[in-house]
Amino acid sequence: MNVNFEYYKIFYYVAKYHNFTKAARALCNSQPNVTRAMNCLEHELNCTLFVRTNRGVHLTPEGERLYTRVSVAVQQLQTAEEELSESVGLEHGSVSIGASETALNIYLLDRLHKFHLEYPGVRLKLCNDSTPEAIRSVRSGEIDFAVVTTPVKVEVPLKEIRLRSFQEILVGGKTFTALASQELSLKDLKDYPLISLGRETTTYHFYEKLFLEHGAELVPDTEAATTDQVLPLVKNELGLAFLPEEMAEEALKKHEIIQMDLKEGIPSRHVCMIYDAKRPMSAAAQKLKKLLQEEKMAMDTE
């Protein structure tokens, strides 16, 4: 039997929509051509596949059996086409990401390294922004998505996915060693020089709120432009600062800085992904987004 395989594709859509006109529309074809193709298929198979009514068509038992097989084949072909399209996109695509300094240092850099090793043909464009700036760039469509730290405030169509939590600690240079044996409160910090990020950052607003909740005021003596600048400032004895544990870990092991005991607990924060649910992404951006989400789900199940 030498049946035109195009007939089977047309049969799949007619059976799916129970309507010749809708099938023709889905196939970008004409209704007479679809009807003619189905008549030819029934003739070549020597059986009736459809029962025609004023409301559309219904499959006969023979049509049901054929559809069971054909639907699997068509769906497999569609999946293969999608995979090939994605593969081409991952060979020559690009991803544009906005990242806050903290999210970049404690989370994103390692993931970008792994992604680049797996897909070396994908070009990465990284915008190092504050969290508010990164969110504005997502909203305007300048970047595919943002990886930033909480607290964040997004409105539809933007969506937030939390990728991992992190904890911050209070640290100081070696001249503050004597303080390490004491339990400090946020109110006590007014007596010591304090280093923070700039007032336009999410981190500043997070600590400003935390201080106020405990009857204290955040009055930094030094404001750093980026998180990377904070640790050198602490090492050079310019004051105390709050840093993510990962960023302070090596310096603590080398005894270059000292961790302080804070009476009030510092709430955990999160690295999160912000994206526009209504704006389509390139295959490469979708792949990186999917990898970050899958890693997050794997961590949740551990």
Image (cartoon, grey):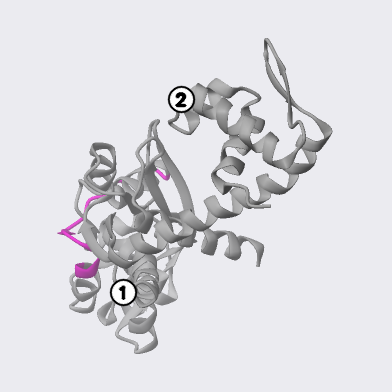
In the image, what residue type sits under mark 2? Ser
Residue segment shown in magenta: 214-229
Task: Please name the residue shown 47% across and 26% down the image.
Answer: 25
Callout 2–callout 1 Cβ contact below 8 Å:
no
In the rendered structure, find residue 120 and report the number of the disc placed on it: 1
Q: Nearer the viewer, residue 198 or 16?
A: 16
Classify 10 Å Cα crowding around label 2: few (below 14), some (14-19), many (20 and above).
some
Q: Position of residue 236 (x, y in %)?
A: 18, 78
Give the SS element for disc 2.
Answer: loop
In the displayed structure image, the side of residue 115 where residue 297 appears, left or right: right
* The image quarter in which residue 37 lies: top right
Q: Is residue 127 inside the magenta stretch?
A: no
Q: Position of residue 1 (x, y in %)?
A: 69, 52
Main SS, magenta residues? loop
Picture layout, residue 197 above or below residue 122: above
Task: Please name the residue shown 56% across and 28% down the image.
Answer: 36
Q: Please state which of the two labelled residues, at mark 2 or mark 1, is closer to the viewer.
A: 2
- Judging by the rendered image, the residue that carries numbered circle 2 is 30
